[in-house]
Amino acid sequence: MIPEPGEGYVRLSPRKLLLDPVKAVGQMVVPLVIALVGISRSDTQFWPIILPLVVIGPLVLGALPWLTTHYRLTGTQIQVRSGVLNKTTSTAPLDRVRSVDLEASLMHRILGLQKVQIGTGVDDDRITLDALAAADAQALRTTLLTRRAVAEQQAVAAAGAVGHAAVGPTDLPDGLSPERPAGPATPSPPLSPPPVAPAVPLARIDWSWLRFAPFSLGRLVLVFGGLGVLSQFADDLPIWNQETATSAWHWLTQFAVAAIVVVLSVGALALWLVISVAGYVLQWWGFRLVREHGSLHLTSGLVTTRSITVEEAKVRGVEMTEPVLMRLVGGAELSTLATGVENGVTQVLPPCPRGVAVAVGEAVLERPGPLTGRLVEHGPRARRRAWFRQVRHALDAVVLLAVGWWWFDLTWWWLAAIGTALLALAAVAGQAQYRHLGHALAGDHLVAGSGTFARIRTVLETDGIIGWVVSQTWWQRRAGLADLTATTAAGTERVLVRDVRLDVAVALADRATPGLLSDFVGPAHGTA
Amino acid sequence: MTDVGGTPVLREPANRVSPRAIPFWTVSALVGDAVLVVAAVLVWLLVPGVPGWAGLLVLLLAVAAVAHVVLMPRVRYRVHRWEVTDTAVHTREGWIGRETRIAPISRVQTVDSRQGALMRLFGLASITVTTASAAGPITVDCLDAATAREVVARLTAITAATEGDAT
């Protein structure tokens, strides 16, 4: 019989034994089919050997992780042991747990399982438990988050008790006694009140937001990706050759070309409507954003459900994006910038009305203003730089096109037309880029406006700034401008204030992080 | 624009890099550029039927390479500066553009020093100070090897004394 792991270690859910073989088969189906086809062509005498391998292989491969992966929760740590030959033990101190994410694919949900991912503040080092029974996963999440809250409360209490009476080790809550097996933390009476604060709802899905779905083009990338994959197969289809193409073309040109274009674009539009709305529903079904245990907690998903938890103390700022099409209908998206989350930027709202994004953003930041306040403009020289940058990109494209035209010996009229259109577009883009440009220091938050067609506003707590970079290209030096980058561990790890006057940049950095630059900021000179 | 008490100016960091950085940059630029120019000349000589203006291009490339080898190290030596105070690391680098970096020592996570083969020949070393941000590593290029050791020791001592997880 299989020995129990012992030492307080617990296995993952036994239902994982049903989950993993299916996954293994899914991953191996293509090589298997190829192998089977190859073998069936050659000889049939190997079948008695091959067939059991094909059946048993996935079962064994699926069972191994369940047999070898154990985890346990002690008073101070969560430990996960895994591996067959190379045993690895991951350990995370409970007070370092920054985020607990639950995820369930369709298979997981049918089996009543959930995948737990625990972020510990170190960039990519996440502990994954795939999979636990849904109830266990929920309990583990609550335990981890309340345990952290207890630890923090205890630290605060200990600090506060210095003036009164020392807190002896006997006063520690039960939950903090070392080597205690898994279970919800129960704070003892001396340390009241209980750390579980009521959950405060910040946002929930409003199906009238569905109107923003077609204007959010993020999913378009996926559609094109899918088309790309399909086209790979289309090459192999017999219908696509020169002959059918030309005959199809003749058949098409019998009709009015305009009518075909109209039909095609209407069809594409209708298809896009269906895809975008379906994608929105799939992703954001049952969306809820609440604040509990000092964390932001997001749940959503129709088929695959996600449950993301980010510790609020690690949220260093927010980013509100208004893509160009969404701006037409007054929509926006909101992300939090946090440290210790997988990629730092977590989208916490579906595409929704700008007012909702602002309200939630301000609730997360716990201060009104940064997302709506006026930004300091960067002046005419920054405008010139924005124009210049876009026009240069357009000229680059025109030069490339010209080379192509010369190579293929095409009509120059077309190039002139395209070039003019590109330059006009560049002028519009430059103006748009300048209009979105700006910065502000709203209390203890650095605000940066950016974006060319999308309007992006990034708000970063000045406490989260861990350095500055002032960089100037040769052109920027001539104009007396600089790019000011605030480096941070949160989000994309940098916040860029572009094309700001050098002295303004230095003053901004100095005010945002008082003391850091004081050694290096010289007295005011007339020449700057 | 709001001007708060005149225009604040970021003063340059106190120390220059080692003067031996000039020959080091010259040699490394020479090696890289020589390969490029020789390749261009070979293409010009060996490919049959190249148009006349190709020779002019090769000549321009050679002139640019010479200017790069002669001017770049001297300009760069004038621009590159560094300073480590008790609270912050401050560097300036570049030769056409300029880049100034400042990081508080309390947020420093690692201090690395690096010495390539060519650098060792010139007795130089580089120090890289990283913070929790991928955008924030600060490199002090081409220090005197002895100075580099000193600075690393000092930085390590200061960072060991500061607490917190530096995020």
Image (cartoon, coloured by chain):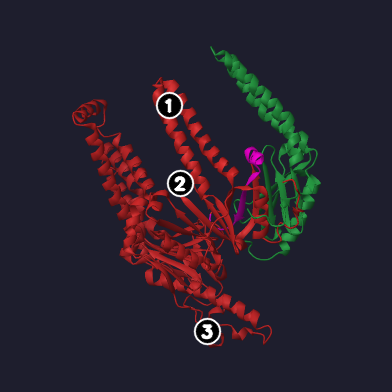
Callout 2 touching callout 1 (CB < 8 Å): no
Chain depicted in green: B
Q: CA distance from mark 3 to mark 1?
A: 74 Å
The lab-note entry on whether marks 2 and 1 share a chain reads yes
Q: CA distance from mark 3 to mark 2?
A: 50 Å
The lab-note entry on whether marks 3 and 2 share a chain reads yes
Q: Residue A212: x, y in percent?
A: 35, 55
User: In the rendered structure, which disc, 3 or 2, sits on the residue that comes first in sequence?
Assistant: 3
Per the image, the residue denoted by label 2 is: A453
Look at the image and give the residue range highlighted in magenta: A473-491
Per the image, the residue denoted by label 3 is: A193
What residue sits 28% from the left and 43% below the top? A268
Amino acid at pointer 3: Pro
Mark 1 residue crowding within 10 angstroms, few (<14) / some (14–19) / many (20+): few
User: In the figure, is residue A59 to the left or right of A97?
Assistant: left
The vertical placement of A328 against A156, above or below, is: above
Amino acid at pointer 2: Phe
Amino acid at pointer 1: Ala
Picture colour for chain A:
red
